[in-house]
Amino acid sequence: MANKTTDYRKELFYQPKHGYDRIDAKERAALEAYAEEYKTFLDTARTEREAVKLSIEMAEAKGFVPYVPGMELKAGTKLYYNNRGKALILAVMGKQPLSDGCVIAGAHVDAPRLDLKQQPLMEAEELAFFRTHYYGGIKKYQWVALPLELHGVVALQSGDTVDVVIGRDPGDPQLVITDLLPHLGGEQGKKTLSDAITGEGLKLLIGSVPYASEGKDRVKLAVMSILNDRYGITEEDFLSAELVAVPALEVRDIGLDRSMIGGYGHDDRSCAFAELKAILELKVPPRTAVCILADKEETGSDGVTGMLSQAFDFFIEDLCEAQGVSLRRCYEKSFCLSADVCNGYDPLYPEVSELTNNAKLNYGVGICKYTGSRGKSGTSDASAEVVAYLRKVFAEKNVVWQMAELGKVDQGGGGTIAKYMANRGIDTIDAGVPVLSMHAPFEIVAKFDCYMTYKAVAALYGAK
Ligand code: MN
Ligand code: MN
């Protein structure tokens, strides 16, 4: 024993290797090309609605058609179900019947942001503002003194819908929330980070010139007049609008080595794109492949477009009925990769993570066996057998992956759509891209991990 120490360690110990030590030049070129495609997707899809719209365009270009009840479904048929323009399910029918289950990858396309209230417009001391109600888990102080864009829709009483995008085009004006100057920020500085900026304080500055008329609220009137000219809307129309402010930041390479990508919404569009690209490339998979681009994950997956909605079950049930298969028979044989980001280990904040079990940048797609908090509360905790299955599939297709955990025990925690899929009776496990500065207006991912998440989904779709 004594003289075979080196080999013996190699044989018995698990020693993960850096991703870049595990790929050749050809694969490196493939990952660089993948990163460019993803950057374009992320730059274009700033909201769940825009992500769904773009994904449908990409899918139709690859031969996907809208699902129509009763349509012919044969091996290789490519279809999609557009859930109210905010969530999307794509499927490619497999060689095997749905009684063998389907292979599902589920990501979400909503991201933390600031929603306008239903009565947003106000004027204070001859400055005009939009009131907001933030969406998802944000650190409020990160959203002040930051250029913002406005995206969304105004649904009119007539039944028409007006698309709104302000601040995206290079010549467009942008919006901002002001912060206090440090000279007068003494008292503010004594508050905690979570108290210094309040939710109600997140008001977007939108105008300062009064309308040429008598009376009060002249700046508000001037802003409303601009909106009326541009979109034909009145103040009442905000009541039925969904307008959201998102960071007006361009997606950029990060690091002198360009190995990372900075941008808004990596959570979870880095995984959404990975799934989308994988399903768009399929011809005839062994089992039916399903790609979910869900909404409302950041607020708990409730609602008609969230993963707690039965819209998903109805769609799969339709496919099953066409083959005379019951939904439950299909679910119990199905597998779901809940493709969502995890936290990357950040050496600037070592106190919150346990390094060995935390995902690291450039070590590949992060598999989270469990999420939850305080004793794994709220997790679906995938079975050991499910992890073993992934090990096998990933080993066969050279997918570089790592085990991940969201922070130290009792440090905090989080959730994804995994438990809602598992609760349906589907074996489900979380896997995704490790992120630095998650939920910040500008998040960071490694190109390597994005590419490996795509490879992971592709490997599962192709698995027998
Ligand atoms: Mn997420
Ligand atoms: Mn999130």
Image (cartoon, rainbow, N blue to C red):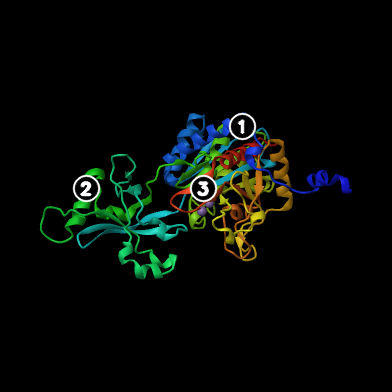
Where residue 370 appears, x then y in whole percent? Answer: 65, 56
Residue at the far front in the pictured view: 3
Q: Residues within 10 Å of mark 1 (few under 14, many from 20)?
A: few
Q: Give the Cα separation between the discs numbered 3 and 1.
A: 24 Å
Q: Secondary structure at mark 3?
A: helix
One can see residue 323 in this view: no
Instruction: Please report whichever mark, 2 or 1, sits nearer to the chain's N-terminal start.
Output: 1
In which image quadrant can residue 351 be found? bottom right
Amino acid under disc 1 = Glu
Amino acid under disc 3 = Asp
Q: Residues within 10 Å of mark 2 (few under 14, many from 20)?
A: few
Amino acid under disc 2 = Ile
Instruction: Please report whichever mark, 2 or 3, sits nearer to the chain's N-terminal start.
Output: 2
Q: Does the closest atom of ligand 1 sit within 8 Å of the Cβ of label 3? A: yes
- Position of 447 relative to 384 (above/below): above
Q: Are marks 2 and 3 in contact (CB under 8 Å)?
A: no
Please name the residue shown 45% across and 49% down the image.
442
Please name the residue shown 72% across and 36% down the image.
396
Q: Nearer the viewer, residue 427 or 226?
A: 226
| Left or right for 251, reference 460 | left
Q: Which residue is mark 3?
A: 268
Residue at the far left in the pictured view: 214
Q: Which residue is mark 1?
A: 27
Q: Which mark is residue 226?
A: 2
Quadrant of the image containing the C terminus? top right
Where residue 375 appears, x then y in whole percent? Answer: 65, 65
Q: Are marks 2 and 1 in contact (CB under 8 Å)?
A: no
Q: Nearer the viewer, residue 307 or 300?
A: 300
